[in-house]
Image (tube, coloured by chain):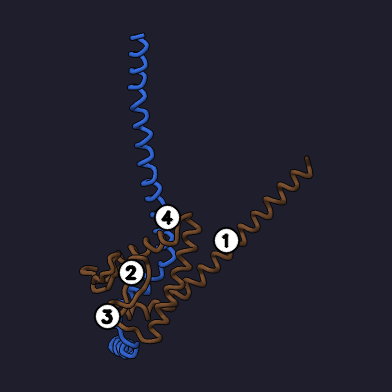
Amino acid sequence: MRFSGFRLLSFLAVAAMVMGVNGVARADKKADLQAKFKERLPQIGALKRDGKVGETFDGMLEAVKGVTLDKDQTKLADDENADRKEIYKLIAAEEGTTAEKVAERNALRHYKSGKKGDWFKLKDGQWKQKEKD
Amino acid sequence: MKKALMAGLAGTLLMLPSCAKVEITHKVEPIHLTVDINIRVDRQLDNFFAFEQQQGNKAQTQPASDGKTNAAETATTKGAAR
């Protein structure tokens, strides 16, 4: 009986350690991602104000219809989207939902905080410019 | 026999509203859960991207250029302040 109690305690201790390590790893990953988003934000903001990129309905950054991004701009957008996918997955895992759901909510957040003139890609593939802040 | 049939019919009629109640519960619950998840996800996103507000506000005051103009403007502003 004592042995079984010991085993239970050991199991709980190991489980707590695994959960703790996972939590720390997740927090580290989020901090890394946040730093990268922060670094890219001014350049992305400039591209948005220039009308070169816009936000899509599925929470991604994309070149606005008819715009061709140069090599650096394409890399910037690709890096941003890769990191967005990561953060969507992390938040989805924490909240017990799907990355698609988180992406959709982020798209809505971008639309709400978007400025007049910012471009948004709708579900039907149409690009629309926001008319009001 | 007739009484038994009537009693059975009455019993069935009484059970019908309870069936309808179960159906309503199934319809309401997923909506509640979805709203709850949306709120939690929105909160997570707002917290994670909170820096955008601060940096975004700064960026809005600057033109979308390569930064040379910004530096020139800053210098002008500093000069004017003096």
The x and y percentages for residue A4 are: 76, 44
Which dot marks residue B40? 4
Answer left or right for B77 relative to A98.
Answer: left
Residue ID at (64%, 54%) = A16
**What letter labels the chain drawn in brown?**
A
The x and y percentages for residue A30 are: 50, 67
Residue in the foreground of this view, choosing between B73 and A54: A54
Answer left or right for B20 relative to A31.
Answer: left
On screen, residue A89 above or below A80: above
The chain letter under disc 3 is: A
Amino acid carrying label 1: it is Gly
Crowding near the residue tagged with mark 4, few <14, some 14–19, many ≥20 C-alpha atoms within 10 Å: some
Share a chain, discs 4 and 3? Answer: no
Residue located beneath label 3 in the image = A66
Crowding near the residue tagged with mark 3, few <14, some 14–19, many ≥20 C-alpha atoms within 10 Å: few
Which dot marks residue A23? 1
Which dot marks residue A106? none
Residue located beneath label 2 in the image = A56
On screen, residue A115 above or below A101: below
Residue ID at (28%, 88%) = B80
Of the image marks 1 and 2, the number of the one nearer the N terminus: 1
Amino acid carrying label 2: it is Thr
